[in-house]
Image (cartoon, rainbow, N blue to C red):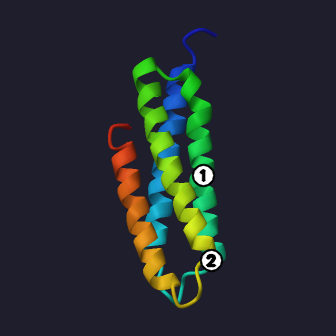
Amino acid sequence: MAGCGESKEDKAKSQVCNARADISKQIDQLKGLTPSTATIDGVKGNLRAIQDDLRKMTDAQGDLSSDRKQQVEQANQAFQSDIKSIAGSITSLSATDIETQLRDAVTSLATGYQQAFDKVDC
């Protein structure tokens, strides 16, 4: 069976890259929200999906090469704090605040994502 399929490291890299791509998709969906399409539950769903993706990356870290593991770990930690901060602010939004604060939160999230995961190439 040796030589068949992907190595553990290849699978971990794929898992990280798939999760990274999904985070990008979730952020794009958040960016596309308007006051008429945005709901607190919908936004929370996007944030939960991002948190799930970050957990998948964490789970895969043990099988990555040491350099890649460090890149993913640092990016994950930096982005986790952004997610927690934004999730906390979104849950306390009123109907009148949602448009401005959601737009600001999503912009901050997109910037944080780019800064955190820029060095993690797929």
The quadrant holding residue 92 is: bottom right
Number of marks present in the image shown: 2
x, y percent for residue 62: 58, 23
Query: Which residue is more in the foreground, 32 or 89?
Result: 89
Query: Which residue is more in the foreground, 67 or 97?
Result: 97
Q: Are marks 2 and 1 in contact (CB under 8 Å)?
A: no
Asked if residue 7 shows in the view, the reply is yes
Instruction: Name which residue type carries label 1.
Output: Gln
Query: Which residue is more in the foreground, 107 or 121?
Result: 107
x, y percent for residue 118: 33, 43
Assign the C terminus to one quadrant of the image: top left
> Mark 1 falls on what kind of element?
helix
The residue at 40%/63% (across/down) is: 108
The residue at 39%/45% (across/down) is: 116
Instruction: Name which residue type carries label 2.
Output: Ile
Q: Is residue 33 above or below residue 88?
A: below
The residue at 54%/12% (across/down) is: 3
**Residue 51 numbered tag:** 1
x, y percent for residue 100: 43, 82
x, y percent for residue 104: 41, 72
Asked if residue 6 shows in the view, the reply is no
Q: CA distance from mark 2 to mark 1?
A: 16 Å
Residue under numbered circle 2: 40
The residue at 58%/89% (across/down) is: 95
